[in-house]
Image: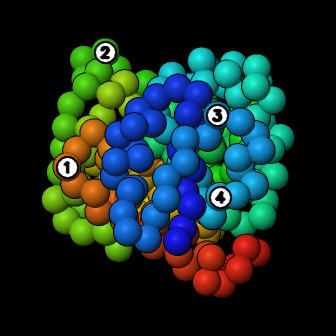
């Protein structure tokens, strides 16, 4: 049985849980730092990144989240979660968790396209992967160890770096659970290999 947590400070926690839940997965809504210890993987949901950072600071999650990631356990960030994972954020002096070697831009599509849906091709996930974009960020640059796994109009919208996965859209707001299954498979593989960097 895999234990996958969803950071439950803000965002679509229930929706992520519904996508992850299965015979081999127990989903835990993470509201306390101590809960991180029992997890095999963690989802950082969408929401509003500055609000999320305030809540992370308020409940003293920042260092424990970094420590969790350093064990080599997989982490998956969507929308605001992607922003939290990036080493660099355009227009900000520093990143938050700084887990992935990439630069992101917040609200990158502008007001004209605050919310829209698209079908994407995602490497190792499939074609016609439904994606909901809501005031979405974009990945503007990636480091050499970061694999770009999906683009929309030539812009990077999903990437993977080892056991870290991030996307600028909301896969949890669709009936297409393939992206979540991809993360579940990452968690299963990591547990099989043991929690150390590969």
Q: Nearer the viewer, mark 4 or mark 1?
A: 4
Percent x, y of residue 35 = 70, 46
Secondary structure type for disc 2:
helix
Residue at 30%, 34% in the rendered image: 133
Query: In the image, what residue occupies the spot 39% across and 56% down?
Result: 20
Residues at badges 3 and 1 in contact (C-beta under 8 Å)?
A: no
Q: CA distance from mark 3 to mark 1?
A: 26 Å
Q: Which label's residue is closer to the chain start, 4 or 1?
A: 4
Instruction: Give the image quarter of residue 112.
Output: top left
Residue displayed at 35% across by 20% down: 110
Give the spatial CA distance, label 4 vs label 1: 25 Å
| Rendering coords of residue 154 (x, y %) | 31, 50
Q: Pointer 4: what residue?
A: 39
What whole-number distance in Å separates the C-alpha atoms at marks 3 and 4?
13 Å
Q: According to the image, label 1 marks what residue?
A: 175
Label 3 vs 4, first from the N-terminus: 3
Is label 3 or label 1 in front?
A: 3
């Amino acid at each position: 049985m895999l234990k996958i947590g969803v950071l439950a400070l803000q965002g679509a926690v229930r929706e992520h849980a519904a996508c992850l839940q299965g015979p081999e997965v127990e989903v835990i809504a993470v509201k306390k730092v101590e809960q991180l210890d029992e997890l095999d993987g963690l989802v950082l949901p969408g929401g509003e990144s500055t609000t999320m950072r305030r809540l992370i600071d308020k409940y003293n999650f920042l260092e424990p989240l970094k420590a969790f990631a350093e064990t080599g356990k997989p982490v998956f960030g969507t929308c605001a979660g992607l922003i939290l994972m990036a080493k660099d954020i355009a227009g900000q002096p520093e990143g938050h968790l700084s887990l992935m070697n990439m630069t992101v831009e917040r609200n990158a599509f502008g007001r004209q396209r605050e919310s829209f849906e698209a079908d994407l091709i995602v490497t190792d996930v499939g074609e016609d992967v439904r994606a909901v974009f809501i005031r979405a960020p974009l990945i503007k640059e990636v480091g050499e160890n970061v694999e770009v796994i999906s683009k929309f109009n030539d812009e990077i919208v999903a990437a993977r770096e080892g056991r870290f996965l991030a996307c600028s859209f909301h896969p949890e707001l669709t009936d297409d659970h393939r992206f979540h299954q991809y993360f579940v498979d990452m968690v299963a593989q990591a547990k099989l290999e043991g929690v150390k960097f590969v």
